[in-house]
Image (spheres, rainbow, N blue to C red):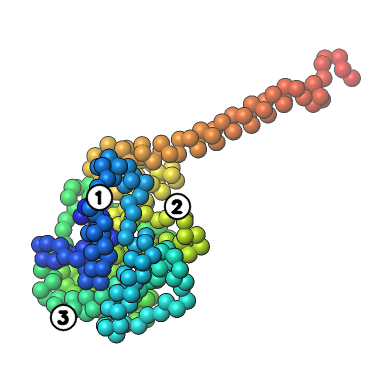
Amino acid sequence: MNMRYLRISGILQRKGRGLIIVPSKHVIAEAMAKQTASDEPMINVFKALTIGAPLPTDNLEVAKRVLNDLMKQMKERHILFDISDLPLTTPAEVNIARRRLEEILSKTNEIIYAADQKNKWKEISDYFNIHTPKTEAGRRSVPMLDFVKEAFLEEKRRQEEEGTKCLVRVDGYTDFIFINRFGMLQHQSTLNKAIRRITRECNDAVLRKNPNAKVLLPHFSCHSLRHTFTTRMCEAGVNVKVIQDTLGHADISTTLNIYADVTKDLKKAEFEGLDKWFAKSMGQKNGDKNTGPETGDREEGDS
């Protein structure tokens, strides 16, 4: 079984130097373990995986068992929840309800974890460091777009309204912009969890409208957004040297490789536009030739 898939799906989590089954996912983990064994020829198993690996929760009975176990755990921890507005007649509907509870549980665990971080900050701070760029090209000045500036100001207003202040110092630096509600530094894994949560919510909204929807948001991380911004710069026609400087690439070939990948997708659309431009231009010229004698041009001797 693919261990990376199990981590991304939230069934496994790091514990020290190893991995453990997340307590709230033990029922689905047991169901997956039972489902792993197969008498099918390996080639058939691989073919099935190419069209989407089946999950235990695709079965209504298993999906309800997982949901009931999750509700039991949340009641034992006195965590409030409400799924009375959701239908529970199909596996897809039950899984939507389960993901809502997992969302609540995840937020609760994050609050507890953040509070624990605050109490252990002196110990945790040893893991944070301020690093210099890997290359000289990494030392750069990046102009701030207007909407980015507004996002910074909005974050500043939010922190002032909530009375949130940075309480940490790393290698002599403090007053960090991106902090959590307890004034501690945001960790990359926390942000990636938030992205996964937003992705789930968007996909759930789509699935509520159409349980058989095929187009859903894929899994992505913070680093993916850097590539997204690069793609947008390429699409906007930003000069490749400007893109190189913005990204801090020491070697322009790195930038050109990204630029080439993006422009492959743009090439067809651009040439379609060029084809229309030529057709329009040639049509106008042909029209001028046809109507030339009627424009009032006179030969010598005309009165």
Is the residue under label 1 in contact with that under label 3 (CB below 8 Å)?
no
Q: Is residue 86 above or below residue 281?
A: below
Residue at figure coordinates x 36%, y 39% from the top left: 261
Whichever of labels 3 and 1 marks the residue nearer the N terminus, that label is: 1
Q: Circle 3 is placed at which residue position?
A: 119
**Residue 265 vs residue 174, the one in the foreground:** 265
Q: Is residue 107 visible?
A: no
**Residue 67 vs residue 283, the one in the foreground:** 67
Name the element at disc 1.
loop
The three-letter code of the residue at mark 3 reads Asn
Is the residue under label 2 in contact with that under label 3 (CB below 8 Å)?
no
Task: Estimate how packed mark 3 is, as few (under 14), some (14 to 19) or many (20 or more) residues with alpha carbons within 10 Å.
Answer: few
Whichever of labels 3 and 2 marks the residue nearer the N terminus, that label is: 3
Question: Disc number at residue 299?
Answer: none
Whichever of labels 1 and 2 marks the residue nearer the N terminus, that label is: 1
Q: Is residue 94 above or below residue 270?
A: below
Name the element at disc 2.
loop
Q: Circle 1 is placed at which residue position?
A: 38
Residue 131 position, x and y percent, is 16, 58
**Residue 82 vs residue 254, the one in the foreground:** 82
Q: Quadrant of residue 94?
A: bottom left
Residue at figure coordinates x 75%, y 22% from the top left: 290
Name the element at disc 3.
helix
The three-letter code of the residue at mark 1 reads Ser
Q: Is residue 90 visible?
A: yes
Task: Estimate how packed mark 2 is, as few (under 14), some (14 to 19) or many (20 or more) residues with alpha carbons within 10 Å.
Answer: few
Residue 303 position, x and y percent, is 89, 19
Residue 208 position, x and y percent, is 48, 64
Measured Cα–Cα span from mark 1 to mark 2: 27 Å
Residue 160 position, x and y percent, is 34, 79
Q: Quadrant of residue 234?
A: top left
Q: Circle 2 is placed at which residue position?
A: 214
